[in-house]
Amino acid sequence: MLTRLLLSKGYRVTVADLLLFGDMGIKELVGEKGFKLLKIDVRSIDMDAIRGHDVVIDLAAISQPDPSGKIDQGLFYEMNAVSPVRVASLSMKGCVERYVFASTCSVYGFQDRVVNEDSEPNPIESYAKMKYAAEKRIREIAGKRSVILRIATVYGYSPKMRFDLVVNAMTLSLYKHKKIMVGRPGTQMRPVVHVGDVAEAMHRVIEAPGDIVGGEILNVGSNDQNYRIADLAGEVCKAVTSECRIEYYGDPDTRSYVVDFTKISRLVGFRARYSVADGTREVYRALKNGLISDEPWTRVIDWWSYLHSQGVVKVTGVSDL
């Protein structure tokens, strides 16, 4: 999504990706003017790959909490805490003008009030703790040449689909089973944002002058898309059908936070264009039309665990430089 947007705006884009989740959305771009693919593990990226680029947008991560401990913690740590710090350091040495780090609103953890970028994070699980640790080191290393984006839970259709994110998971459940599964207790609050809006936010951030966004932390989302999980299920249901069954499952989720997204709107003029209903309908249509399906690689933790068990990915002992 982001690569296509940037190419359409006239940028030359290099994607560094091992393609462990497949080449959907990428293979069509190979050979296109301005596009370059480096099939490489981000943990082994070097100065030659970095040098000559004006901006680095770091999306590489095992981007999902792992409460059941399926993934080797060494691998989890290297990908989520060590790798981004290493890439940020290389970016500074390679004279990159701006390093943009994709963090998460999960760093807020549990909060009993509305939080903004000045609020004290309260990361609960290891994923959020590692992201927050990386944030702090990146700001030390890159200072005003860095921008930290704390992104709400993403939803919506993408060629490289995710069905382990709440809106998409609900939509898949509705499509397959005519019901929506809601994690207990259902009262927990969560901000959500469409993948297309995230791409647009990143585009605006790299376009913005350094004296506006340099060194800033920005929440990425929309004030009107903070939802109780149970209410979110209702929105998904209404988007595609007049009635559906809602069932609750699992242990209570201790994460709950309402996030203020005013700052990104004020600094770069970002406004979310898509609603939960928009995202639900496009995912439902894509499922119905066979454009996407429920595949093992659509769930991050399960797929990383499988790849590790097969020896495809390993702990490398990489340092953050």
Image (cartoon, grey):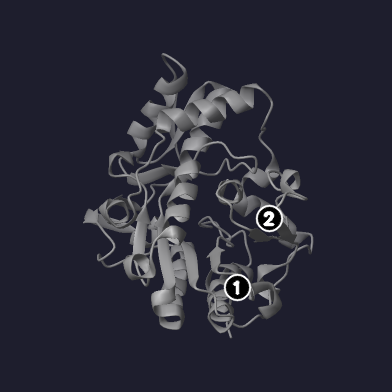
Residue 149: image location, x then y, percent? 42, 60
Tell me if residue 172 comes above or below residue 68 in the rendering.
above
Looking at this view, is 183 or 291 the one in front? Answer: 291
SS for callout 1: helix
Residue 122: image location, x then y, percent? 32, 65
Q: Amino acid at mark 2?
A: Gly
SS for callout 2: loop
Q: Which residue is mark 2?
A: 34
User: The N terminus lies in which quarter of the figure?
Assistant: top right
Residue, x 58% and y 75% (percent of image)?
87
In the shown orientation, is residue 315 left or right of residue 117? Answer: right
Whole-angstrom CA distance, mark 2 to mark 1, is 31 Å
Q: Give the quarter of the image for residue 228.
A: top left
Q: Residue furthest top?
A: 242
> Of callouts 2 and 1, which one flags the residue occurring earlier in the amino acid sequence?
2
User: The C terminus lies in which quarter of the figure?
Assistant: bottom right
Tell me if residue 213 comes above or below residue 63 in the rendering.
below
Residue 260 makes an appearance in the image:
no
Q: Which residue is mark 1?
A: 78
Q: Give the quarter of the image for residue 204.
A: bottom left
Residue 35: image location, x then y, percent? 69, 55
Residue, x 50% and y 57% (percent of image)?
65
Q: Amino acid at mark 1?
A: Glu
Residue, x 56% and y 60% (percent of image)?
59
| Mark 1 neighbour class, 10 Å CA radius: few under 14, some 14 to 19, many 20 or more | many
Residue 85 makes an appearance in the image:
yes
| Mark 2 neighbour class, 10 Å CA radius: few under 14, some 14 to 19, many 20 or more | some
